[in-house]
Image (spheres, rainbow, N blue to C red):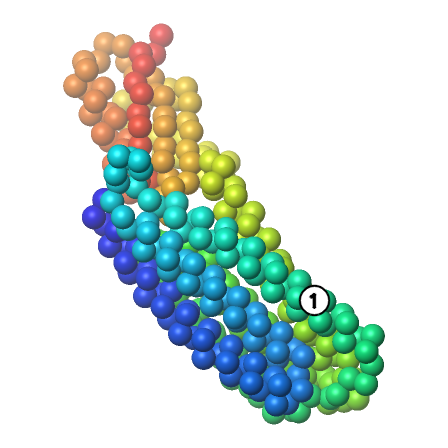
Amino acid sequence: MVNVYDEIRKGERGAWVSIAAYLLLSAFKLISGYLFASSALLADGFNNVTDIVVSVAVLIGLRISQKPPDSDHAYGHFRAETIAALLASFIMAVVGLQVLIDGIGSIFKGGKQTPDITSAGVAVICAVIMLGVYLYNNRLARQINNKALLAAAKDNLSDALVSVGAAVGIIGAQFGLPWLDTVAAIVVGFIICKTAWEIFRDSTHSLTDGFDEQELSDLRSTIALVPGVEGIRDVKARVHGNHALVDVVIEVNPQLSLIEGHRISDRIEERLQEVHNTMHVHVHVEPKL
């Protein structure tokens, strides 16, 4: 379990990098958006504000998940980060809806001011910076095999793309089509809501013990390759933080001794931890009739 907690502590670095980047970029975008009259840049800035909340929630979840198992949490506190992400999804949804309402409302107001071309440069600079954050978090996530940080890295990449989209809308507005800036803002609002929905869907799926069918099939295939396993009656798994808890019922030669059956169970646990990053494996051995 020491390695698990070490990975979580390393994952905190990525969360801090995201928080620092979002703090700077959101302030930069919001100020520039007001100064240069860009709805798309303002929407992008509000998008980064929600990302700050999400990153802080992930950081808090990572901190709580480092608490060791106790009498009330025999498997530890690893689901804390999933709960934090769920709460963050609600905040993102509220901000995303507000951006959509403001963007759609501005269409009917008329007299849309053409944003200053400087705001497009701001958006491009922010896109480049966020791309760098994505590359850092993506590399760190793969090094420590942290799915939560990998998801955060993908969010960093989507934010870079949002900034590129904002720049496109601003540049398009320079050619006598100022409504393109508003359209870009509405698209950003949809992206925020879509990201909120995906986080909500994944979080609730994990918290209700949902598990990917393909991954379950891969677990079964790995177990079947362990020497001594002659059949698999059942395999169940659930997500706990960034790891899986697995329950498996296997069949072995009825002539094997208790010690031999125990050794097969140990090999299954070791193999699943090596290949699938499982945290806990419960193996029930039955004779093959």
Q: Which image quadrant is residue 149 in?
A: bottom left
Q: Is residue 6 left or right of residue 178?
A: left
Q: Is residue 125 above or below residue 145?
A: below
Query: In x, y percent, where is residue 128?
Result: 49, 79
According to the picture, the residue beneath numbered tag 1 turns out to be 100
Q: Which image quadrant is residue 255 in?
A: top left
Foreground residue among 216 and 37 = 37
Q: Is residue 36 above or below residue 73?
A: below
| Residue 108 is at least partly visible in this image | yes
User: Which residue sits at x=50%, y=80%?
Assistant: 27
Q: Is residue 175 left or right of residue 10?
A: right
User: Which residue sits at x=68%, y=73%?
Assistant: 185
Q: Is residue 17 left or right of residue 109?
A: left
Query: In x, y percent, where is residue 94?
Result: 61, 60
Q: Is residue 193 above or below residue 132?
A: above
Q: Is residue 30 left or right of residue 6?
A: right
| Residue 124 is at least partly visible in this image | no
| Image quarter (top left, top right, bottom left or bottom right) of the N terminus | top left
Foreground residue among 152 and 251 = 152
Query: In x, y percent, where is residue 67?
Result: 27, 48
User: Which residue sits at x=36%, y=28%?
Assistant: 247
